[in-house]
Amino acid sequence: MKLSKGYLALVIILGVIVIDQFLKIWVKTNFYLGEDLPVTDFFHLYFIENNGMAFGMEMGSKLFLTLFRIIAVAALIFYICKIKTRECISNGYVACFSLITAGAAGNIIDCLLYGLIFNDPFPPEIATMFPENGGYAPLFYGKVVDMFYFPLFSFNWPEWIPWVGGEHFVFFQPVFNFADAAITVGIVSLILFYSKRLSGSETES
């Protein structure tokens, strides 16, 4: 049976959130902060935490960032509800916005709850879920868990190159999570396949 666009969005959002949170809780309760487990030469499970946006970027205060995410997710859900019944809107377009919404929501959960439900021990101790002495931060101030690291290749810059000469370069350095990946796939797919609709040059029928 073919899913309606509304159910498709719901399945994608719930599916991404469940997978994202399962991975984060598993890493949080099985790895110590900073632990690096090479799966292959170019793929590691590397447990870090950050206060910022996707791929560890920083933007303003922690509280502002969390509130911004909540408002953004609410706006995305409203937009999906608005377009889900329109015949001119494709399933792929809805799927893209659903991935972005789910990824943002997944990271919101970290910010809202992880400070309350986890402690923050010094490595090599591993975090405990629902510790007796309470969590490491109040509501809205939890840290986002990241774990996927792809150091595809590395080299040392030649000494004669200005500013970076002699430094070690690794590609790809950012550490990210499943929610970040969902956001990235959704945004890239929108740009590649739905740029006309986004720019308004594709009119609705």
Image (cartoon, rainbow, N blue to C red):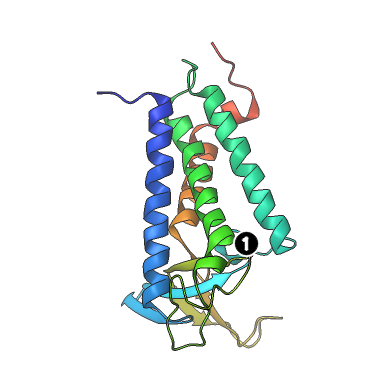
Q: Position of residue 147 (x, y in %)?
A: 44, 69
For badge 1, the amino acid type reads Leu
User: How packed is label 1: few (under 14 Cα within 10 Å), some, or many (20 or more)?
Assistant: some
Q: Which quadrant would residue 46 be assigned to in this image?
A: bottom left
Going 63% across and 47% down the picture, which residue do you hit?
70
Judge whether 127 appears above or below 107 on screen. Answer: below
For label 1, the SS is loop
Q: Nearer the viewer, residue 123 or 177?
A: 123
| Quadrant of the image containing the C terminus | top right
Judge whether 144 appears above or below 71 on screen. Answer: below
Q: Nearer the viewer, residue 9 or 153?
A: 9
Q: Position of residue 168 (x, y in %)?
A: 55, 84
Furthest residue toward left: 1
Q: Position of residue 164 (x, y in %)?
A: 66, 81
Q: Position of residue 74 (x, y in %)?
A: 61, 39
Circle count: 1
Judge whether 30 appears above or below 160 on screen. Answer: above
Q: Nearer the viewer, residue 76 or 164?
A: 76
Judge whether 204 appears above or below 118 on screen. Answer: above
Furthest residue toward front: 132
- Describe residue 202's horizontal placement relative to residue 146 as left or right: right
Going 45% across and 75% down the picture, which residue do you hit?
47
Q: Nearer the viewer, residue 51 or 45?
A: 51
Going 43% across and 76% down the picture, which residue do you hit?
128
Inspect this view and state whether residue 33 appears: yes
| Quadrant of the image containing the N terminus | top left
What residue does disc 1 label? 139
Inspect this view and state whether residue 40 appears: no
Q: Which quadrant would residue 144 be assigned to in this image?
A: bottom right
Q: Which quadrant would residue 42 be assigned to in this image?
A: bottom left
